[in-house]
Amino acid sequence: DIENASGERGGGKDGGGESGIIIGKKKGEAAQSKTDITKLRTAIQTLCQSCNPLGRCLEYVHEDLEAMAKELEHWKALRRRKMAELAEEEAKTEASLFTLHQELALAEQDVADKRAQIRFFKASMVKN
């Protein structure tokens, strides 16, 4: 290699210039090119084999998206119905509780009145 390199710089021993070195390089490059092409071919085949299942899956993506959109609309509609039912039940509960709260307030007022009467009678008994 050192002789070839020095021959390249100095014009070579045989006086033919760089032809020997270039031919040697071209032969090495051809073998390397064949190896590279084989590796590239193998890599492309592997890539295609890997991508084919992905391509088949992508064919069904639109159908899946449509199904998911329909399901989402179903759940949204169900939520709206249930929220309306909840609001209706809360209104009914509030209405029934309103009357119970009024009854409770009347009962508490009666208890307070009775306690006041008891205090009054105790005070009158103490005076006697």
Image: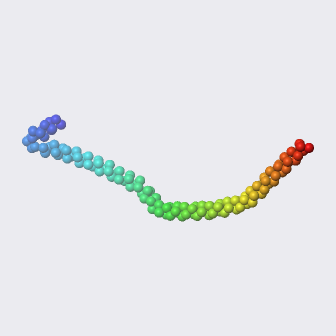
- Which residue sits furthest front? 127
| Camera-nearest residue between 45 and 96 | 96
Q: The N terminus lies in which quarter of the figure?
A: top left
98 vs 4, nearest the viewer: 98
Report x, y in % for residue 63.
49, 63
Work out whether residue 60 can be spotted.
Answer: no
Identify the residue at horizontal 57%, vertical 62% (top origin): 76
Relative to 91, 57 lies left or right:
left
| Left or right of 113 in this view: 72 | left
Residue drawn at x 20%, y 47% is 26
Give how far across and how far down residue 102 sits, in percent.
Answer: 75, 58
Q: Is residue 18 above or below residue 98?
A: above
User: How far from the left and from the top, in percent, is residue 69?
Assistant: 52, 62
Which residue sits at x=29%, y=51%? 37
User: 87 or 1: which is nearer to us?
Assistant: 87
**Left or right: 60 as drawn, with respect to 105:** left
Percent x, y for residue 124? 88, 46
Q: Is residue 93 above or below residue 7?
A: below
Tell which residue pokes out farthest to the right in this image. 128
